Image (cartoon, rainbow, N blue to C red):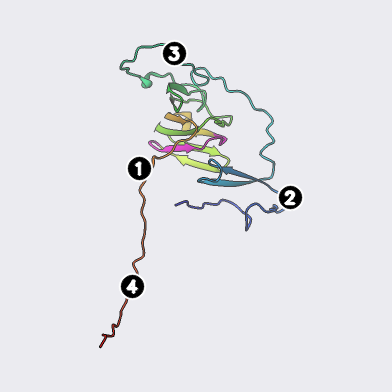
Amino acid sequence: MLHRHTLGRIPAKPHTAFYDDDGKLLMEQCVTYEGFNGPFSILYFRTPPTDEFAVDNLALPGFCPVEAVREQALHRRHVRSQDLEPGGDFLTARRTLFFNSDVHVGSGKPTDPADRFFSNGDGDELYFITSGSGHVETVYGILAFREHDYLLIPKSTPYRVHFDDNRGTYLVFEGRPHLRIPGQYRSIIIAIPIPPPIHMVINPVL
């Protein structure tokens, strides 16, 4: 079941003219998950969300882009992610450890404040906070987190992660194009109302 959550002032009906207190027409943006097949969000902006002043290609060593080794023996490996050097913000500290066509797995130990937003156009991202606390800032609002929390960032969402004291460790999964819970692992509870007993009077046939 989808739960409706609202923040701020919204119109009585979506997809209609909506004005702020100064009489300015607000711009509506509908963010969907594969069309309208699933959750969706409707956002209202004073400044059109398409007004982007600077969009750069991402090129961060160790994170993106990554290239596969053309040939390597398949054998057991011990990846010592605890030996990764701390440094950078939530984005520049990120290091890709494993990847294939469906998922990228990385880790990071940021030590610097987050000064820019990041929007992943390739897939959803799921952070597991190994250590530290803080908050994630998105167009949907601000969400606090603490150690051992999971943060699911939907595809194309502009966001940045702020760690308290600029210290933390995370493991991140990037699903392409999406991260989902398999149907066989979902709990489905169906409530079936029980009708009241029916009292019947049967007239015997003489």
Q: Report, in whole angstroms, how far the alpha carbon at label 2 lies from the one at label 3.
A: 55 Å
Q: Of label 2 and label 1, which has the lower sequence position?
A: 2
Q: Of label 2 and label 3, which has the lower sequence position?
A: 2
Q: Can the viewer see residue 21 in this picture?
A: yes
* Residue 195, image quadrant: bottom left
168 or 55: which is nearer to us? 55
Magenta-tinted stretch = 147-159
51 or 40: which is nearer to us? 40
Amino acid type indicated by mark 2: Lys
Tell which tag, 3 or 1, sits nearer the viewer: 1
111 or 30: which is nearer to us? 30
Query: Percent position (x, y) of residue 77?
Result: 32, 17
Q: How many marks?
A: 4
Name the residue carrying label 2.
24
In the image, residue 25 above or below residue 70: below
Q: Report, in whole angstroms, how far the alpha carbon at label 2 lies from the one at label 4.
A: 55 Å
* Residue 126, image quadrant: top left
